[in-house]
């Protein structure tokens, strides 16, 4: 069975500092990987995804993530945090050609300190 | 609208009552998912519809929960004899993927359900 682990349920960074949100997965085959952001009282919005090809993927709002097969990781980064980045972030994984379940991590709440 | 629409946005009901939550997916999306998000928790998969195939109900927590999808579009999640532990945000998502799962899910804003 697949699983997703997000280390750190709460992360605080200063405005302008590097954002690093960790995601590790377990999968028997190379998975498809996603990062979503959730603002208060809203649903989840896709930040970026990895399916095949280049392992460094760029998303919206200046975020990027790198798929590292050897580390079974898909960490999310942003060079410089903005106040507007404060939100809940979820990592998700699914296996190619399974067509059904997406597995989500428990989320990381990002606080940006002015 | 172009996005996934869920109604109602908020629902407060008494323990023991039945509730129905509605999801209008993005037009043309064949895949539809229901999730439950409890306070401070991640997303708990409930049920998945793909086209005309039999739904994947493996995530439904009890037989009080059921869902249907009429005409391959609108879906209704029904909770019978609600309990206080059913209080959560129920999220619906749709996707255009047809089994290759490389398409992301598009989420509605959720229904916040509170059981008194």
Image: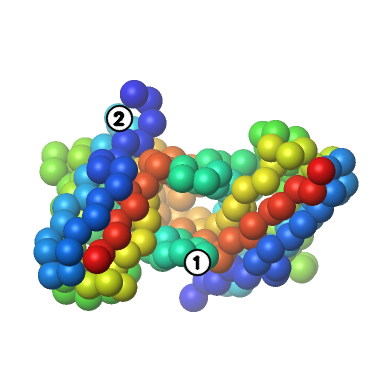
Mark 2 burial class by Cα count in 10 Å: few <14, some 14-19, many 20+: some
Specify the label residue B41 is tagged with.
1
Q: Relative to A29, is A18 on the left or the right?
A: right
Where residue A108 sits in the image (x, y, percent)?
64, 60
Tell me how the rendering is colored.
rainbow
For residue A31, say whether it is visible: no
Question: Residue A72 sits in which quadrant?
Answer: bottom right
What chain does badge 1 belong to? Answer: B
Specify the label residue B27 is tagged with.
2
| Residue at image location 87% in from the left, 41% down from the top | A16
Q: Earlier in the sequence, mark 2 or mark 1?
A: 2
- In the displayed structure, would residue A84 be above or below residue B90? above
Specify the label residue A85 is tagged with.
none
Q: Nearer the viewer, mark 2 or mark 1?
A: 1
Relative to the observer, which residue lies in front, B53 or A106?
Answer: A106
Where residue A85 sits in the image (x, y, percent)?
69, 42
Where residue B8 sits in the image (x, y, percent)?
25, 43
| Residue at image location 42% in from the left, 61% down from the top | B37
Q: Quadrant of the C terminus of chain A?
A: top right
> Same chain for the residues at labels 2 and 1, yes or no?
yes
Rounded to the nearest angstrom, the CA distance separating label 2 from label 1 is 30 Å
What chain does badge 2 belong to? Answer: B
Secondary structure of residue under mark 2 = loop
């Amino acid at each position: 069975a697949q699983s997703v682990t997000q280390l750190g349920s709460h992360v605080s960074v200063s405005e302008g500092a590097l954002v690093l949100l960790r995601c590790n997965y377990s999968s028997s085959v190379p998975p498809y990987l996603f990062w979503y952001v959730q603002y208060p009282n809203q649903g989840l919005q896709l930040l970026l995804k990895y399916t095949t090809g280049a392992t460094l993927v760029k998303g919206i709002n200046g975020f990027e993530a790198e798929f590292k097969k050897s580390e079974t990781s898909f960490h999310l980064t942003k060079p410089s945090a903005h106040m507007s980045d404060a939100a809940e972030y979820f990592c998700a994984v699914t296996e190619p050609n399974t067509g059904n379940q997406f597995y989500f991590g428990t989320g990381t709440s990002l606080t940006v300190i002015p | 609208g172009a996005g996934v629409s869920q109604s109602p946005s908020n629902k407060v009901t008494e323990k023991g009552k039945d509730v129905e939550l509605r999801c209008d997916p993005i037009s043309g999306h064949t895949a539809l998912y229901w999730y439950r998000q409890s306070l401070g928790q991640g997303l708990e998969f409930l049920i998945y519809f793909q086209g005309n195939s039999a739904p994947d109900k493996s995530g439904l927590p009890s037989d009080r929960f059921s869902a249907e999808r009429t005409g391959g579009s609108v879906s209704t999640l029904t909770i019978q004899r609600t309990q206080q532990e059913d209080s959560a945000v129920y999220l619906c998502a749709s996707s255009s993927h047809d089994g290759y799962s490389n398409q992301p899910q598009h989420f509605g804003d959720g229904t916040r359900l509170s059981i008194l």
